[in-house]
Every structure is written in structure tokens, then in C-alpha cells.
Image: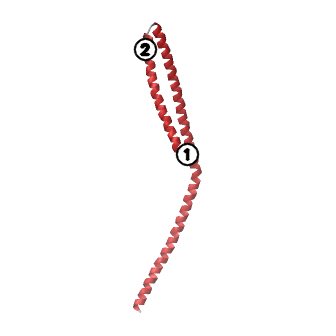
Amino acid sequence: MAGGTRGGRIDQARGKIKELEGRLLKLEGQLKVLQGQTRQARGTARVRLARLEKNAASQVARVEAALRISRDRVSEALQTGRRRVEKLMRSVEPTLQRSLSQGREIVRASAAEARVLSRGLRAGVTAGREAFRRSRRG
């Protein structure tokens, strides 16, 4: 159950990363437009556009930082999950090997018992056939 929840959180984080990447591309595009307009503007408009450019650059930096943090968190979650699975596999493997070994022993013993029963059955059938033949002759 916890694995499903963790997987959901990872998917959610991946979705958030994609969203942030989209926002980052949009902001970078807007920043380029502002930079172009700032170069062409004069006077008060140039000051306002420079301020907008500065704000846009600040937003781009914040989104990039958030994106880095999200990627780091997803990477950490994946590494933690991988370590837990590896640890679980190491702890389960000896038990699995023991169970397989015990299963092989049970199969060997059952096969030996089946051979003995099969020999006994054949001997009984042969003896029954001989008894039947004797009773028909005599």
C-alpha cells in the first residue's frame, strides 16, 4: 500500500516538474521579448520595461530553483525506494533459497515414495493376474 502512495507522489512530482518546465519556457520567452523591447524603448518606458525584465528574470531564477529542488526530491525518492527494494531482496533471498531447497527435498521424497508404491502396485497386479489364472485352470 505504501508503495502505491509513494508511486503516486513520484508521479505527482513528475507532473509538477513538467508544469514548472512549461512555466520556465514561457517565462524565458517573455523575458526575451522584454529584453528586446527594453533595448528599443526610451525614457520612462525603458525604466518600466527594465523593471519588468528584472522581475521576469527573478521569476525565471525562482522557477529554475524550484525545478532543481523537485528533481532532487524525485531522485532521492527513487534512490530510497531502490535501496529499500534491494535490502528487502537481500533479506528475503535466504528464506527463498531455504524454501526452494525444502521443496526439492519434498519432491525427491515424494518421487521415491511414488516409485515404491508403483513397484508395489505392479507386483500386486502381477500377483492378482497369476492368482486369477490359477483359479481358472484349476
* In the image, residue 107 above or below residue 89: below
Q: The residue under label 1 is which amino acid type?
A: Val
Q: Are marks 2 and 1 in contact (CB under 8 Å)?
A: no
Say which residue appears at 44% left-offset and 86% top-offset.
131
* In the image, residue 74 above or below residue 33: below
As rendered, which of 8 and 76 lies closer to the eye? 8
Where, by quadrant of the figure, is residue 79 drawn?
Answer: top right
As rendered, which of 107 and 66 lies closer to the eye? 66
Say which residue appears at 45% left-offset and 7% top-offset.
42
Mark 2 falls on what kind of element? helix
- Whole-percent x, y for residue 62 in the image: 53, 24
Checking the image for residue 36, the label placed there is 2
Which residue position is annotated with label 1?
85
- Whole-percent x, y for residue 136 in the image: 40, 89
Work out which quarter of the rendered image holds the C terminus and state it: bottom left
Checking the image for residue 74, the label placed there is none
In this rendering, the count of numbered labels is 2
